[in-house]
Amino acid sequence: MNRLDVYKKLNRLGKAWLLLCCVVLSVVTHADGMGPYGALVESVASLPSAEIVKLGDLCVRNRNKEKALAYYIMVSNRTKERWDEDEMEHVSDASMKAGNIYYWSGSYAIALKFYVNGLKICDGSKEKKRIMEYYKCIGNVYCMFKEYEKALDYYRKGLSLADKYPDKFSLLALLNNCCYVNILLGNTQDAKEYYRRMQRTDDRNNVGFPFLIRFNLALIKASEGRYGEAVDMQKRLAVYAHRHKLAPNYECSALEEVYKAYFRMNEYDSTLHYVDRCWQTAEREGLRHMYSEAFGMMSAVYLKKGEIQKAQYYKTKYLSLKDSIFNRREFEMAKNQQFMYEMDKINQAITDLQHKNEKSRQVIIYQRVLIGSVLLTALVVSLLLLFVHRQKKRLIKNYRNLYLVNRKLAESHRHADATQQQYREELNERNERISMLTEQLERMGGGDGKVPAGQEETGKTKCYTGNLTGEQSQSLADAIENVMKNTIEYCREDFSLALLAEIVDSNTKYVSQVINETFGKSFNTYVNEYRIQMACMRLSDVEEYENYTIRAIGESVGFKSPTTFIGMFRKQYGITPSVYRKMAKNHFLH
């Protein structure tokens, strides 16, 4: 059988298939009870859509596509009365599957009608499970009619929904198609970007994923003129597709790219060899558009070889078969249907926008009042914040001044204490000299050396038992002050009046009396002032006491309660310990 006979037989089969599809569509649509499918429709008309779709799926698995098509069309033509989400999903599913049967049989215009109808239903549902797949299928139909820009537009629409309605399988297919169409349009850089996005999907569970990745890489190599590398990859991909039993269009696509690359390399015998392989596979699997392209390539090869008669022969066959497959009239009708749907969507969007604008106009006055109130409130708050800020600055300035005053006062106290200590030492030296001179006078005057009555031996503080004389009171006061200024006994938590009396070798009555009369303070006040002074020194000591907490500083100077410590500190210095420490730290840094 020569190629012409094969083509005639193929053309007859194609026409018979189209006629059968039209009959099925007519029978299912009118359901007049005539013919085998009329009885089929009547037998399942009362079943739920989900069960009818399952019957269609079973027919597809049994390779009875005509019967499956009848089931799918029946569901897709159901009216919209009382549709819920599940029903919309089943009708959309049926439209998709009917469109796929028409698509793979070469009836692309009819397939587009079902895809557009299914897209309407899917777009009206809440979940929109197959929305990306519909945009992919519609783009595929435009691609078959070589309207690549339009096809790419639909692929991109599908990709734009990937985050909102995730569908990993459709995402991979859309990226693959975008890469392929950009190659056809000569946009190699865009194709590479889609190729990189495909790699990031990493769908290792899909046996077709490695094929698609390498297939697009081979396309990119071919677009860059690296035909030898592309041919080797496509040959291996054809073997891979056959071995892993991928869909027939995978193997045919690889073979098609092989003969196209050989044609560009001017290796016409190899081109014809792989055209023949692709044509046989496409014929066996019913991929009509692929074997129509094979006729077109054969015409081009024979034209290059100078065999004009053969070239014209195959070109005539190519054009005839192409006209039978690509029905432009039906395609334009389907495009118009799709255009009307898109216009309806735009009109609906405009209507929704008008409603929103109307609603906005109704609340505009309220919004203005609200905005005015907010601005007024913001102004008042800003003024308050400005006032608070200024007050805070003043407070910080006052704190700083208070800190500096207290610091100078503390330094003055220390200086006065040092001076007083110096004077006391000088006085003691003079007293010692006076004592020595007195003893010398007594020895010279023949004194008996007896100590006057009422006095004890010098060198030891007296433990008074009667009322204190002025000299005794001053002596005890000096002893107390010496303990408070030259020791840190008062920093002990157990420091008490009794302990101080024991240290100065006196009793609590006289110690309390001397503190009250000489210093004009109670014992607690007197001790706490020394403790607060020591706390100030430690708060100012940034290097040694920087890591101490306020509580730890208070405990280190004898305060058991941090509340008491803070209260006493604030009472004595007018600021809290934390503010004092902050001011001391800033003073130290500057």
Image (cartoon, helix red, strand yellow):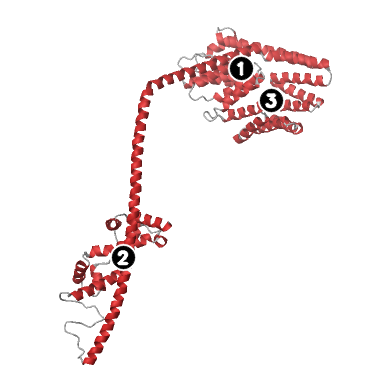
Callout 3 touching callout 2 (CB < 8 Å) = no
Mark 3 vs mark 2: in front = 2
Asked if one can make out residue 168 in the rendered structure from this viewpoint, the answer is: yes
Between 400 and 221, the residue placed more toward the observer is 400
Residue under numbered circle 1: 111
**Residue 393 or residue 558, whichever sits in front:** 393
**Observer-nearest of 505 and 87:** 505
Judge whether residue 51 can be spotted in this image: no
Mark 2 belongs to which amino acid?
Answer: His
The kind of residue on which mark 1 rests is: Ala
- Numbered disc 3: secondary structure: helix
Q: Position of residue 432 (x, y in %)?
A: 28, 82
- Residue found farthest to the right: 306
Give the side of residue 36 with respect to residue 399, left or right. Answer: right
Label 1 vs label 2: CA separation? Answer: 102 Å
Q: Secondary structure at mark 1?
A: helix
Residue picked out by circle 3: 184
Amino acid type, mark 3: Leu
Quarter of the image for residue 388 reads top left
Q: Quadrant of the N terminus?
A: top right
- The mark that comes first in sequence, 1 or 2, is 1
**Left-right relation of 524 to 113:** left
Q: Which mark is residue 413?
A: 2
Among the two numbered marks 3 and 2 on one chain, the one whose residue lies closer to the N terminus: 3
Q: Which mark is residue 464?
A: none
